[in-house]
Amino acid sequence: MERIGKYDVVRELGRGATSEVYLANDTFADRKVAIKLVRQEALGDIEYGRRFQKLFLTEASLAGKMQHPHIAAIFDAVADQEGSYIVMEYVEGTTLEEYCRVENLLPIPRIIELVFKCSKALDYAHRLGIIHRDIKPANILMTSEGEIKISDFGAALSLGSETTQVTGVGSPAYMSPEQVRDQQLNHQTDIFSLGVVMYQLLTGRLPFKATNNFSMVYQIINVDPPPPSIHRPEIPPAVDVIAKKALQKNLERRYQTWSDFSAALAGVFNELQSTAEQVPETEKFNTLRSLAFFRGFSDVELWQVVRISTWSRHGPDTVLLREGEPGRSFFIMASGRVQITKQGRLLTSLATGQCFGEMSYLGTRDLQRSATVTTVTDVTLIEIADEALSQSTESCRNRFNAAFLELLVSRLEDANIRVSQLLMERVVAVQ
């Protein structure tokens, strides 16, 4: 096969009972894509054909709707007499199945980081009214750079849809109790499934072990799995607690929101980290979300900031910038306090959430630093180079422009107050 629609086929990537997947070139957008082509014989059986067509249309309806760094994008979908196919983002790499074997487990902090990213991506999908319903290691891709992408939304449940939803979909080992019972579902079913994936990544074993689907369903409904640390003793108690809560059969006892689940993962991740200079991405994301400067940024834009920024930690009395030195980057305080001096005189001090050096970005020419910045306490610093920011999306740059505008207005108001106070002091002194 040389072409599928307007796409030039490169090679076959795989095939299943109902579809074939090809690597292709999208010459119009100048990118590689993966194309899932439906086999016509899969639609031949009336009963099965209707079911499969429904799942195909569900995934096709999501084309262009989800844009998140940890969700594989769906670019296009075609269903006509010549054939039905879905065009997706091509992710070069593997799936998390590779890291669910006892002999090939990832480090515990790395697992927590991956699950955290999945939780944020599924939270994003849920806010669009989408429940995945088939979260499992085979549907979580890992790129060659080590990033993850959730894929295969064919079984997705659209909460806003008025059409009849297909039931009985998903992989039994990863289904929630309410899913195996064919009950009404909400986002907590995906939380349960991601809990199963987390358990398997941590231990190389499923929490519910059975020889057939009937036994699996019984265990999911009635049996509480042992804590992951039973299988891997170095797993800390805090991780056991998270796994246990994600796998609660009772919805009231399970994590109520994705934010709750993400916060728990981030908290234990930070506990697992040493005081090394490198700041983990999970901590970066949560820190950015907590800072007022980034209040208007979406999750997608925050992940961009994580990618384009450089983070560093410094002890007290460290000179970060020197007066007169050139520079084309600006800085935001993730934690700690610094003091600003000019010609040896103290001008002001800055604390967590405040920024300095922004004139390098707002200016139109190379600037020299107008003051010296020195740490007063331990400091975590976010540095963003002007060139790196220029490579981000327009929406991300607009967020920075709005944040800096708000900052400048605030500083002008503070300056006016100080001038008024000085004038009042002079009037009082004259009287």
Image (cartoon, rainbow, N blue to C red):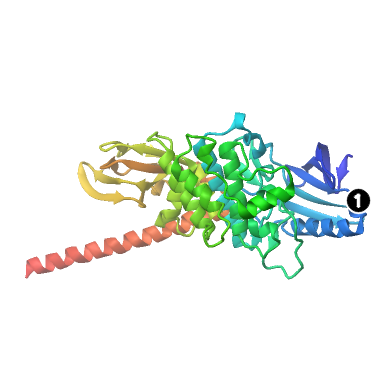
* The quarter of the displayed image where residue 101 is located: top right
Residue positioned 75% across, 64% down in the render: 165
Among all residues in the image, which is located at the extreme left? 431
Closer-to-camera residue (335/420): 335
Neighbor class of circle 1 (other Cα within 10 Å; few <14, some 14-19, many 20+) is few
Residue positioned 7% across, 67% down in the render: 430
Placement of the C terminus among the 4 image quadrants? bottom left
Residue 414 percent across, percent down from the top left: 28, 62
Residue 205 percent across, percent down from the top left: 62, 38
Q: In screen coordinates, is 314 left or right of 103?
A: left
Closer-to-camera residue (233/77): 233
Q: In screen coordinates, is 286 left or right of 9?
A: left
* Three-letter code, disc 1: Gln
Placement of the N terminus among the 4 image quadrants? top right
Closer-to-camera residue (227/342): 227
Residue 153 percent across, percent down from the top left: 71, 53
Among all residues in the image, which is located at the extreme top? 103
How many labels were placed on the picture? Answer: 1
* The quarter of the displayed image where residue 179 is located: bottom right
Give SS at disc 1. helix
Residue 354 percent across, percent down from the top left: 35, 52
Whether residue 366 appears in this view of the structure is no
Residue positioned 29% across, 46% down in the render: 337
Whether residue 89 appears in this view of the structure is yes
Q: Which residue is mark 1?
A: 40
